[in-house]
Image (spheres, rainbow, N blue to C red):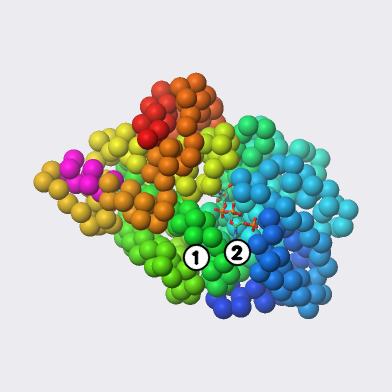
Amino acid sequence: MNGDFTLYTPTKVVFGHDAEQKTGALVKAFGGSCALIHYGGGSVVRSGLLQRVEASLDEAGVRHVALGGVVPNPRLEKVYEGIALAKQNGVDFILAVGGGSVIDSAKAIAYALAEPEYDVKELYEHTRAPKACFPVGVVLTIAASGSEMSDSSVISYEDKKRGCNSDLCRPRFAVMNPALTATLPAYQTAAGCSDILMHTMERYFVQGPKMELTDAIAEGLLRTVMRFAQVLVSDPENYEARAEIMWAGSLSHNGLTGCGNDGNDFASHRLEHELGAMYDVTHGAGLTAVWGSWARYVYKNCLSRFVRFAKNVMQVEGATDEETALLGISAMEDFFRSIGMPTNLKELGVAPNENDILLLAKNCAKATGGKVGSAMPLYEADMANIYRMAKE
Ligand code: NZQ
Ligand code: ZN
């Protein structure tokens, strides 16, 4: 029925100054006796975070092994490496120390360990649904994907980037110290803020009835992220701004801003995932590069939502509803540019030719079962049209 929903957010959030010191105690409290610490390309080594987390595990009496080297748009090969290392060492808990890529890789390892008789790739191919998952904990270093509370894991393999969604992989805990994100390059901060905005917008531009409270939360979240993202452009070490963005990142993708929706859109995400698969672009930047084209392609089909967005979020209004909607879209693109994000594929640094566009659309249609979107259902030809519009 309209407005019915289930919200499941089992993740214990430990937020604030020096929160990472509690990691060991948390792993232990959630039953871990031997943790696989999973991390990325080295930022956590350089910052000293890895050492602090290891010390915290030692103090709690939790054994640990470590596996770094997760790349943005994490690869299945690294997941297999993690599975082997975990099996050799009797690991019973996966601890992700990093961002969405590390967390998603950790979730994949956790799925594999819980059902060792199967190849975990099948979950991403959707030829099998997961039935179990080892516990995952997170020490978050970038506010972006929301994976620290989400039900999702996105893995790249061959020329594909595919997601697996299940409540089983929602992390047991997320340690969030906003100060840890102060070392992010400006581009990653901005891409992260954009991803956070997108996770709420994907739930905002939908057909069907909406709850007023959910809309108010979503609009407040969007305004807050935009305000503090701009603060971070000139003052990247501002703790208050880092904290606002970090908390928004989790709330944007844990389900809260979709409560009462009949369905979510996520077309921009699915269009981006194909760009990620083909060109290995930064997720948040890929999203901003297609969003404006997507919005202009679909807004007439979902006009009242775009009008509300323009007025309540972007605070712009034109003479007609259509003008208001278009002003809202332009204002959001202006915002993306103001934090250094691309608003088309050329600015993203990729130049697909017509064959590439047809392949992107074909792959996107294949990955989405032929159709994606709530604001306006998109089919393969629509996907190709949006990629074409997004070229420059
Ligand atoms: O690898 P290191 O050296 O750590 O560097 C990372 C990486 O280069 C760096 N970084 C992270 N924290 C840092 C830092 N550098 C300095 N200081 C810090 N504190 O940032 C770069 C990006 O890291 P990544 O983990 O890739 O970023 P993000 O959190 O944006 O994750 C992106 C991945 O998540 C997926 C995306 O598709 C992409 O693969 N998503 C996952 C979702 C989910 N599981 O719910 C939802 C999202 O929509 C998204 O699809
Ligand atoms: Zn995203």
- Find residue 47 and report its horizontal and vertical position in percent: 66, 69
Decide if residue 31 is in sight here: yes
Q: Residues within 10 Å of mark 1 (few under 14, many from 20)?
A: many
Which region of the structure is painted magenta? 321-329
Question: Which quadrant of the render holds ligand 1?
Answer: bottom right
Q: Mark 1–mark 2 contact, CB under 8 Å? A: yes
Distance Cα–Cα, label 1 vs label 2: 9 Å
- Residue type at the position of mark 1: Met
Above or below residue 203? Residue 23 is: below
Position of 168 with respect to 112 (left or right) is: left
Above or below residue 364? Residue 36 is: below
**Quadrant position of residue 326:** top left
- Find residue 170 and report its horizontal and vertical position in percent: 61, 56
Q: Residue at x 49, y 55 (%)?
A: 187
Residue sitting nearer the eye, 359 or 108: 359
Q: Residues within 10 Å of mark 2 (few under 14, many from 20)?
A: many
Give the residue pinned by disc 1. Answer: 246
- Residue type at the position of mark 2: Leu
Q: Residue at x 78, y 78 (%)?
A: 59
* SS for dot 1: helix
Give the residue pinned by disc 2. Answer: 140
- Find residue 20 and report its horizontal and vertical position in percent: 65, 73
- Find residue 65 and report its horizontal and vertical position in percent: 82, 61
Q: Residue furthest left?
A: 319
Q: Residue at x 72, y 52 (%)?
A: 69
Position of 256 with respect to 219 (left or right) is: right
Q: Residue furthest right?
A: 88
Q: On the rendered image, what quadrant is the C terminus found in?
A: top left
Position of 333 with respect to 145 (left or right) is: left
